[in-house]
Amino acid sequence: YAENHPGMIMLGNALRNAGYNVFLPRIPNLKNLLLVKENVDWFAHCYQELLTHNSVNDNVMVVGLSYGGANLLRASMDQRIMNSPPKSILSYGTYYSIQSALDFFITGKIQYKNKVFNIKPHEWGTIVLFYNFFKTIDTKCDKNKITKLLKYRIEDNDDKVDEILNELNEFDRNLINKVLKGIIDDEITSIINKMLNANLDLLEYLSPSNWADKIRSKVYVIHGANDSMVPFTESAHLANSIQDSKLLISFLYEHREISTDRGIFFKFKELIKMVSFFANYFHYNK
């Protein structure tokens, strides 16, 4: 949905109500859920264009959500941004290492405070992976039809999804049904690993674990403990690798498997932590 995403609109309205001018640039490839190097160039280009707007001064904050956060952080090292850097960058719910993010998709495991918790990963992650990379591996499956089906799924065009499903042979239909339902068995795991190896250069380019220590901007990192797309531990690693960062992991909405105290006192402490984080954020960016 790009700039029409309800979450983007909610965040934009919150910042606008706090007194900021808000711009929601469209990154064409991300709107189509394409994971490509060109996304980084688009972020730098959009930032450069933003600075030419007559309502923009030197006090610029930029925000990247989910996988867009990693793209934004990579773009922050582009000269088009470094020449006139923003006051700060805020990353919400992004990943640190492609490998550990994929491990979560496959196993559903999160390591936290020396404990391992099993959380069912969101099927959307598997859908996006197969949509982007299934066509890059050798397989007897009908890669074109399966990729087209996933495109229609991303577009919420259920009639077209069902139409192509009926055209597939039994093997392909069983495979894609597992992808759509987020079922990760040995077969799906094997395919994911093949896709990873076939696209290693791109994935390492987009993985902050390889370059986060070179970021010089002030970075605020936020993640929700209930995120089933990217585990919150990714943001913890990300913040630790960035020289000037501040981290907030919100446990107000957390997995039952991780919760240790869901009482009023616990929620009050979490609320105070959140208020303190954003007070620091807005004070720094004023």
Image (cartoon, rainbow, N blue to C red):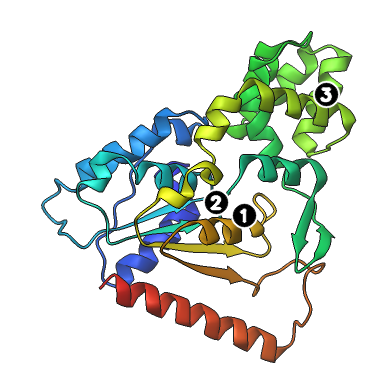
Q: Could you tell me if the residues under marks 2 and 1 are in contact, i.e. CB atoms within 8 Å?
A: yes
Write down the residue under mark 3: 175
Could you tell which of marks 2 and 3 lies nearer the N-terminus?
2
**Nearest to the observer: residue 146 or residue 246:** 246
The mark closer to the camera, 3 or 1, is: 1
Residue 234 is labelled as 1
Residue type pointed to by label 2: Thr
- The residue positioned 74% from the left and 87% from the top of the image is 263
Q: Could you tell me if the residues under marks 3 and 1 are in contact, i.e. CB atoms within 8 Å?
A: no
* Quarter assignment of residue 234: bottom right
**Nearest to the observer: residue 126 or residue 237:** 237
Residue 206 is labelled as none
**Nearest to the observer: residue 43 or residue 80:** 80
Residue 164 position (above or below residue 14): above
**Nearest to the observer: residue 219 or residue 90:** 219
Residue type pointed to by label 1: Glu
Q: Residue 20, position in %: x, y?
A: 26, 66
Q: Residue 205, position in %: x, y?
A: 50, 33
Write down the residue under mark 2: 94
Left or right relative to 96: residue 145 = right
Left or right relative to 174: residue 153 = left
- The residue positioned 54% from the left and 70% from the top of the image is 248
Element carrying mark 3: helix
Could you tell which of marks 2 and 1 lies nearer the N-terminus?
2
